[in-house]
Amino acid sequence: MAENPILRTCSPEKLFANKRATKNHHILVTATAYTAQSCGHRKNSRPKAANGECLSPDVNAIAVSPDLIARHGISMNQTVRLEGFDRDFKVMDLTSSRLQKTIDIYFGNNQTAARQWGRRTLILSWN
C-alpha cells in the first residue's frame, strides 16, 4: 500500500514544530537630526561612525543612546525602523552616555532638511 503524500507533508513533527517567534520591539524615543557638518568634519573628509564605517551622504544611519543597547536589546549594526520614515536605518553610532532613550538620525550633508526636521518624539522598532 502506497503512503499518502498528504500525511507525509503533514506529519506531527512538522505541524507541532517549535518555531521561534520573531518578537517585534518598540520604544518611544527623542530623535534629533544631524549632518556631517554638524559633527565638525571637514567638507572633503568622510566622518566615521562608532562601528568603523564611513558615513556617506546617502547612508541611512542612526546613533543611539547607550541605554538602548544596554537595557533594551538593540545592537550595533542592527536594522531598525523609525515611525514616519519609509526606509530602514542601520545603528552605526552612539550618542552621549548622558542621554537616555535618544537617537540621532543622520541626514548626510543636508543641513536644511536636518534643521527643518529638528527634534521629535517617535517610535523606534526592531526585531
Image: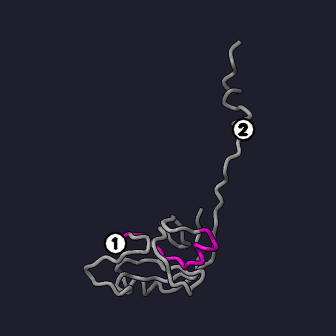
According to the image, label 1 marks what residue?
56
Give the CA distance from mark 1 to mark 2: 47 Å
Q: Tell me residue 47's x, y (percent).
A: 34, 77
| 20 on left or right of 39 | right
| 101 on left or right of 92 | right
| Residue drawn at (27%, 82%) of the image | 43
Q: From the viewer's perspective, is residue 74 above or below residue 8? A: below
According to the image, label 2 marks what residue?
15
Along the viewing direction, whichever of 41 and 117 lies nearer the viewer:
41
Task: Classify residue 125 by image quadrant.
Answer: bottom right
| Residue drawn at (54%, 67%) of the image | 75
The question of residue 89 being in magenta is answered with no
Q: Amino acid at mark 2?
A: Leu
User: Label 2's element?
Assistant: helix
| 74 on left or right of 19 | left
Q: Please, which residue is most extreme toward the left here?
A: 44
Q: Please report the bounds of the magenta region as a residue range.
A: 53-73
Quadrant location, the C terminus: bottom right
The question of residue 58 being in magenta is answered with yes
* Mark 1 nearby-residue class (10 Å; few <14, some 14–19, many ≥20): some
Q: Please, which residue is most extreme toward the top here?
A: 1
User: Label 1's element?
Assistant: loop
| Residue drawn at (37%, 85%) of the image | 111
Q: Amino acid at mark 1?
A: Ser
* Mark 2 nearby-residue class (10 Å; few <14, some 14–19, many ≥20): few
